[in-house]
C-alpha cells in the first residue's frame, strides 16, 4: 500500500500501488517538496482576484506553467509529536489537532505560479487566485505574516521554443497568472512577445490597467498593464461585455491580430491558459495555420502528484491498445501543459 502523507502530518490518500501507472507511464522524477512559506503581500486585484506573495528560504527550480498545492486552512505548524488519546467504547475519539477539528478543507488547492523572484532574503512566489469556494474564501483571510503550507513545484511547464523568435501568450480569467511568469521567461530568452488578456468585464480583470487599452477591432497591442509591463510585453485586453479594450472573446482578439499579419506564422509560438472553450479555439486556429501551440489545461486536482488519478486528459496515442488512437494522461503529472495537437476535446 502507498500512503500519501500531508505535510501537516495526517494521511490523505491510501491506495494500492497497482493502481498507479495503470493509466499512464511513470512520471519523470523532479525536484519538489513540502514547504512552509510566509505571506509577505496579500492584496485584492479586482472584485474576485487576489495576489498572494509567498517568501521561502529556498525553493526548487521552477518553470512557467507549473503549480503549487496550497493548504487553505489554519496556519501551518510543525508536525506534532504522536499522542495517545482515550477512546471510550461506543464513542468516537477526541480530536484536538486543528487540521482535523477546524472548519477547513481537507485537500490542498492547486494554484499556478504567476511569478518568481530569487532575492537575498530567499525565494518569492506570486500566486494570483480567484475566490470560488470555501478554500479560496478562507485563503483571503490569511494576513501578511501568515505561515502557509505548500507542495511544489508540480507538473510540467511551458517549453520556450528556441527556433521561434515571436510569441503570443493568451490568458483568460485565472489563466492569466501563468502567462505573467511566462512573459518574464520569454523576455529573458530574448523573444518578442505579445500578451492577450481576457475577462468577462473590467471588474474581473486581475491586472492593474495603467493606460486605457486600445479598443480597435484589430486588437493593437499596447503597454497598458503594470504586470506585463515588467517584462516589456505589450498587451491586448479583451472583455466579453466591452467594458475595457476589445469587446468580445480574447480568442477573437487573437484571431484579428493574427489575421492582420502582425507576426509571421512560421516564426510564431503560441501559449494559452484559461477556460476550455478558449483553449480549444486557440488550438484549432494554430493547428490550421501550422503554428506550434502549448495549452496549460485546468482540471480538479486532489493530490497534484499523480496519486489519486482524478485529473485525466484524453490525448492522441498511436500506440494505444486496440488501435483506438488515444489514451489517458494525468493533467497534474503529465501536464498541465500539453501540445494542442495532442489534446482530444
Image: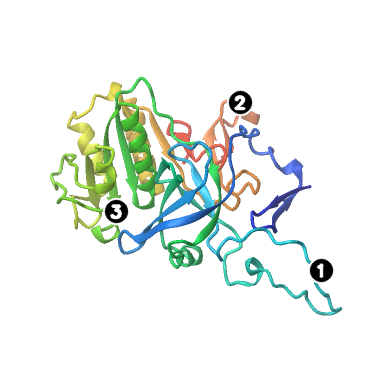
* Observer-nearest of 34 and 292: 34
Horizontal placement of 254 versus 303: left or right? left
- Which one is nearer the viewer's eye here, 305 or 189? 189
In this rendering, would 309 be left or right of 235? right
Mark earlier in primary sequence (3, 2):
3
Residue 168 location (% of width, % of height): 30, 34
Instruction: Say which element carries label 2.
Output: loop
Is 91 placed left or right of 12 in the picture?
right
Question: Secondary structure under badge 3?
Answer: strand
Q: Secondary structure at mark 1?
A: loop
Which residue position holds label 1? Answer: 84
Q: CA distance from mark 3 to mark 2?
A: 39 Å
Q: Is residue 223 above or below residue 185?
A: below
Count residues near mark 2 (Cα–Cα under 10 Å), then give few for <14, some for 14-19, many for 20+. Answer: few
Local packing at callout 1 (Cα closer than 10 Å; few below 14, some 14-19, many 20+) is few
Question: Is the residue marked by circle 3 packed among few (<14), some (14-19), or many (20+) residues within 10 Å?
Answer: many
Dot placed on the residue nearer the N-terminal end, 3 or 1: 1
* Up/down of 87 relative to 108, above or below: below
**Disc number at residue 199?**
3
Percent of width and height locating residue 195: 27, 40
Residue assigned mark 2:
319
Q: Nearer the viewer, residue 339 or 81?
A: 81
Earlier in the chain: of badge 1 and badge 2, it is 1
Q: CB of mark 3 within 8 Å of CB of mark 2?
A: no
Amino acid at each position: 500500500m502507498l500512503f500519501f502523507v500531508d505535510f501537516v502530518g495526517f494521511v490523505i490518500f491510501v491506495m494500492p500501488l497497482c493502481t498507479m501507472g495503470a493509466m499512464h507511464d511513470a512520471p519523470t522524477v523532479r525536484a519538489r517538496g513540502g514547504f512552509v512559506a510566509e505571506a509577505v503581500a496579500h492584496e485584492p486585484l479586482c472584485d474576485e482576484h487576489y495576489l498572494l506573495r509567498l517568501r521561502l528560504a529556498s525553493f526548487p527550480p521552477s518553470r512557467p506553467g507549473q503549480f503549487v498545492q496550497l493548504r487553505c486552512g489554519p496556519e501551518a505548524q510543525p508536525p506534532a509529536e504522536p499522542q495517545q488519546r482515550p477512546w471510550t467504547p461506543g464513542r468516537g475519539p477526541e480530536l484536538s489537532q486543528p487540521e482535523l477539528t477546524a472548519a477547513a478543507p481537507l485537500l490542498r488547492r492547486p494554484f499556478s505560479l504567476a511569478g518568481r523572484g530569487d532575492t537575498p532574503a530567499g525565494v518569492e512566489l506570486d500566486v494570483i487566485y480567484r475566490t470560488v469556494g470555501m478554500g479560496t474564501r478562507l485563503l483571503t483571510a490569511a494576513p501578511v505574516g501568515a505561515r502557509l503550507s505548500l507542495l511544489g513545484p508540480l507538473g510540467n511547464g511551458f517549453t520556450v521554443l528556441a527556433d521561434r523568435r515571436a510569441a503570443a501568450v493568451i490568458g483568460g480569467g485565472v489563466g492569466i497568472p501563468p502567462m505573467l511568469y511566462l512573459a518574464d521567461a520569454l523576455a529573458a530568452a530574448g523573444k518578442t512577445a505579445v500578451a492577450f488578456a481576457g475577462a468577462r468585464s473590467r471588474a474581473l480583470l486581475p491586472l492593474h490597467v495603467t493606460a486605457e487599452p486600445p479598443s480597435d477591432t484589430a486588437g493593437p497591442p499596447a503597454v497598458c498593464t503594470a504586470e506585463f509591463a515588467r517584462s516589456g510585453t505589450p498587451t491586448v485586453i479583451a472583455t466579453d461585455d466591452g467594458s475595457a479594450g476589445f469587446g468580445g472573446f480574447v480568442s477573437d482578439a487573437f484571431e484579428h491580430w493574427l489575421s492582420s499579419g502582425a507576426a509571421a506564422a512560421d516564426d510564431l509560438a503560441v501559449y494559452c491558459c484559461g477556460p476550455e472553450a478558449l483553449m480549444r479555439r486557440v488550438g484549432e486556429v494554430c493547428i490550421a495555420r501550422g503554428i506550434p501551440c502549448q495549452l496549460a489545461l485546468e482540471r480538479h486536482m486532489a493530490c497534484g502528484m499523480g496519486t489519486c488519478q482524478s485529473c485525466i486528459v484524453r490525448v492522441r496515442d498511436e500506440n494505444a491498445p486496440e488501435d483506438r488512437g488515444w489514451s489517458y494522461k494525468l493533467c497534474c503529472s503529465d501536464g498541465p501543459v500539453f501540445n494542442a495537437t495532442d489534446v482530444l476535446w
